[in-house]
Image: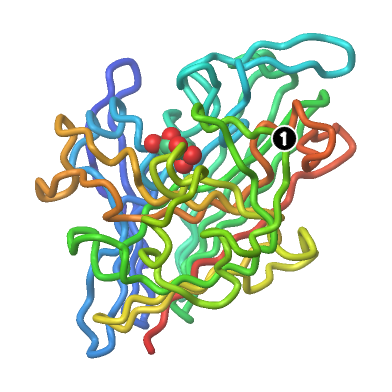
Amino acid sequence: MIQKQYFGTLTGHGEVFSYLLRNQSGMSVRILELGGAIMELKVPDRIGRVADVVSGYDSLRDYMLDTTYFGALIGRVANRIANGEYTLGGKSYSAFVNNGPCSLHGGKIGFSHRIWSVKPIDGEEPRLILALHSPDGEEGYPGNLEVTVTYTLLSSNALSIHYEAKTDRRTPVNLTNHAYFNLGGYASGTIFDHVLRIDADRYIPTDGDLIPTGEIRSVKGTPFDFREPKTVGRDFYTDSEDLRLAGGYDHCLCFTDGETREPTLRMEAYEPNSGRLMQVYTNQPCVQLYSGNFLNNAEHPQKGGYPQIPQTAFCLETQKMPDAINREQFDDVILSPDEIYDYTTIYKFSVR
Ligand code: GLA
């Protein structure tokens, strides 16, 4: 079932709507036209009590002005590009620098802050098809890019996000979703007790500006080894240069054996009090594990007035490597006119 609802008015655009998708297994998700953001995601716990497990805001103003990227679709290039600069086909390009010395998450007005066109397709497994046209030269990126993102709420209590993009010139593309999760409920406190498993054998160290140093390092013996399940908190305060520089987890972890053809189970997060389990399937090669270290903006409280507090939510942003456009040994992020960008990430919810 799909319900369309007025959310707010945007100067220069007009009314902005959200879409509530519900299945028959007790799960619902609300998506906003602005940024295609997941505003709300409700799933039952062990005894059937439903809670909203994603961070979000109550007003359009907060979605426009804050820099958390709560639930939003991110593009044209997710994560950081050092100095916003890169060369492609012998030509230099500059993307807007919006985060220290970097261009982050698409630049000045990334896909997260654009209004997407939304086509609802109702049914037992309701679906939203979101589309965006990113013109040639926008934010310093070459080529007209046509982006389609399909959200499907499956009967198995999973939210599937299918990303597709086409270009008419070679351009870097790296799309993701920036949902912040707390499986105890978004207002339930820190995430340190969540048990996390990530099938990643390498990670990317960064400098103090969170720009990759260029190294791809084994997770073995580091706080980034989640191959055996462990709590988020276990190694959080260990003496680690990487964690210190980033103020917590804010790193790209590379899945064992790289990207897969079909979405593969790569990550699990379990919250012992509620019993909620989230399993993440993807065919992307990497994930940005982010422990919400910058959740500290008192001017933009979350839904219901709940304050922003660091480490009360985490992101598992499936994507390719950060600053890959400037690093030969990193993932290939160039999309050519003869290719289709095609990735899927599925967040599946159950209880244990
Ligand atoms: C990403 C980055 C973080 C932070 C958030 C948004 O996940 O890696 O450093 O900028 O986005 O606040």
Q: Horizontal and vertical percent for residue 320?
A: 68, 45
Q: Quadrant of residue 140?
A: top right
Q: Horizontal and vertical percent for residue 201?
A: 69, 63
Label 1 packing within 10 angstroms: few (<14), some (14-19), many (20+): some
Residue 125 seen from this side: no
**Is 61 situated left or right of 126 in this image?**
left
Decide: is 150 above or below 300.
Answer: below
Report the front residue among 209 and 133: 209
Residue at (30%, 24%) from the top-left corner?
14
Question: Farthest left residue?
Answer: 305
| Quadrant, the N terminus | bottom left
Q: Say which residue label 1 marks.
A: 214
Report the front residue among 235 and 345: 235
Decide: is 96 above or below 22.
Answer: above
Residue at (23%, 43%) from the top-left corner?
57
Q: Quadrant of residue 174?
A: top right
**Is 286 situated left or right of 222 in this image?**
right
- The quarter of the rendering in which ligand 1 is drawn is top left
Q: Is ligand 1 closer than 8 angstroms to the Cβ of mark 1?
A: no
Secondary structure of residue under mark 1: loop
Residue at (67%, 31%) from the top-left corner?
323
Residue at (32%, 55%) from the top-left corner?
313
Q: Horizontal and vertical percent for residue 262?
A: 75, 68
Q: Mark 1: which amino acid?
A: Gly
Residue 202 seen from this side: yes
Q: Horizontal and vertical percent for residue 325?
A: 75, 29
Question: Farthest front residue?
Answer: 239
**Is 2 situated left or right of 348 in this image?**
left
Report the front residue among 296 and 18: 296
How many labels were placed on the picture?
A: 1
